[in-house]
Image (tube, coloured by chain):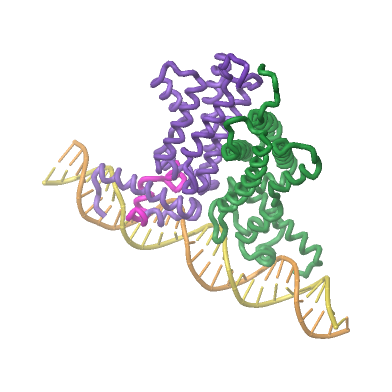
Chain colours: A purple, B green, C orange, D yellow
Amino acid sequence: MARKTKAEAAATREALLDAAEEMFMEHGVARTSLEQIARQAGMTRGAVYWHFKNKGDMFRAMLERVHMPFQDLVDEIEALEHDVSSLEAIRLACLKGLERFEQNPRARRVHAILIHRCEFFSDIDPIAMQQEIADECRDSLYQHLLISEEQQMLVQGLSPDVATDLLQATLAGLFHEWIRDPSRFSIYERGVPLVNQLTSMMRRSTDTSGAN
Amino acid sequence: MARKTKAEAAATREALLDAAEEMFMEHGVARTSLEQIARQAGMTRGAVYWHFKNKGDMFRAMLERVHMPFQDLVDEIEALEHDVSSLEAIRLACLKGLERFEQNPRARRVHAILIHRCEFFSDIDPIAMQQEIADECRDSLYQHLLISEEQQMLVQGLSPDVATDLLQATLAGLFHEWIRDPSRFSIYERGVPLVNQLTSMMRRSTDTSGAN
DNA sequence: CCGTTTCCATACACAATTGAATGTAAAATA
DNA sequence: TATTTTACATTCAATTGTGTATGGAAACGG
């Protein structure tokens, strides 16, 4: 076969990753061979072994195309709206995150693969990857909920630790429930009332009258 | 090899399933061969193919050893304590469920395998299995939360639908976070304050005075 | 006590993947 | 323009796992 332009080569690399996504999603990671991926992309295994070391390397590259830390969402919110409370910033960041998952099919597919379509690997541990993502999100939540407590935003009796557990568990549970079959419901439409209700219940009432 | 007693044969069947659990947990389902399972149990593949049709059949049998519907927990609570409100029954059933997972290592391992150590299969779809379990739990929660609403136990503005989403997502999220690495924390110790806090926030205040 | 069935071990044939080796024509480079 | 890389395709060797077929000895039923 003839040599390709740098741009063409980059394009086939992307095509291979696209094909890997499709095949991984449809048949699972373990049960798709590199040949299936190559043919799906209109290539042969030669192309795969040129661009990637092996299947694990390919998997890693596929994940790197959609990396999106939760902290960025909060930063984004806070950069956009300065006068908002920390708890409100969390709420908005959650909604933003839900919206993004809803609208980014690639991110959705890749996360679905990471969670439901793969298991162990030669040198790759998907559970550890999920762990990292979850911890990243959790730490960010905790930091901002600490501030919320300092600002006396949380209802009495709600520690920032429990609040973190609650928010993180709710978001993770919602996400898992959704990613299992995204066609069943819209994560945004179900998530918005969830997040609103939860943050509302966590927020200390500013109502000075005794009546509810 | 010589023929075994009925009891002996049943014992080797259990030993094979035990071995399958260990190997599946350690190396993932796809990457463990039937030979590895057999040798772990001190047998050969002949024993495996005698007791099971193939790996998928073995997987199914492994799951059937630990089936435990959520509804049973609620029933158990309600049978034990008649004078308790529906919301309180839910709370107690959740705690009971957490406790059971904490104390039943086999159930823990099998669920960990189902969620994190396997993907597709010849004729088995682990995601559909998770779906079934989750739906079962969800339906049960919903039924009892409907009753809670009729009894006017829920705070104003909290529909039984949102309450169901909230509880189910929280429990699922907590469970997923824990099952990913059960050695990181005790699901019971983290879960108890979570469930208490959440049900407390969901419960309508019976405080007749205006002050909080 | 004898035939039959059971429970498993052993052996075999087959298909599927993998990684590496080799080939090659065009792009890049000098 | 001559030479060297690059970007793949093709081929090969080796491994691995699967399903099945066969064998054998002891347990079971009559």
Q: Position of residue B193 (x, y in %)?
A: 68, 29
Q: Is residue D21 left or right of residue B68?
A: left
Residue B199 included in the magenta stretch of the image: no
Which residue is nearer to you in this view: A56 or A28? Answer: A28
Residue at horizontal 43 percent and vertical 35 percent from the top: A99
| A55 falls in the magenta region | yes
**Image quarter of the C terminus of chain A:** top right
- On the question of residue A144 being in view, the answer is yes
Task: Give percent across and percent down for residue A118.
Answer: 52, 48
- With A19 as the anchor, is B16 left or right in this view? right
Q: On the image, which quarter does residue B87 sit in? A: top right
Q: Which residues are magenta?
A: A39-60
Tell me: A50 left or right of A28: left
The location of residue B108, given as percent across then percent down, is 68, 44
Residue displayed at 35% across by 56% down: A44
- In the picture shown, does residue C1 fall above or below B53? below
Can residue B26 be seen in this snapshot?
A: no
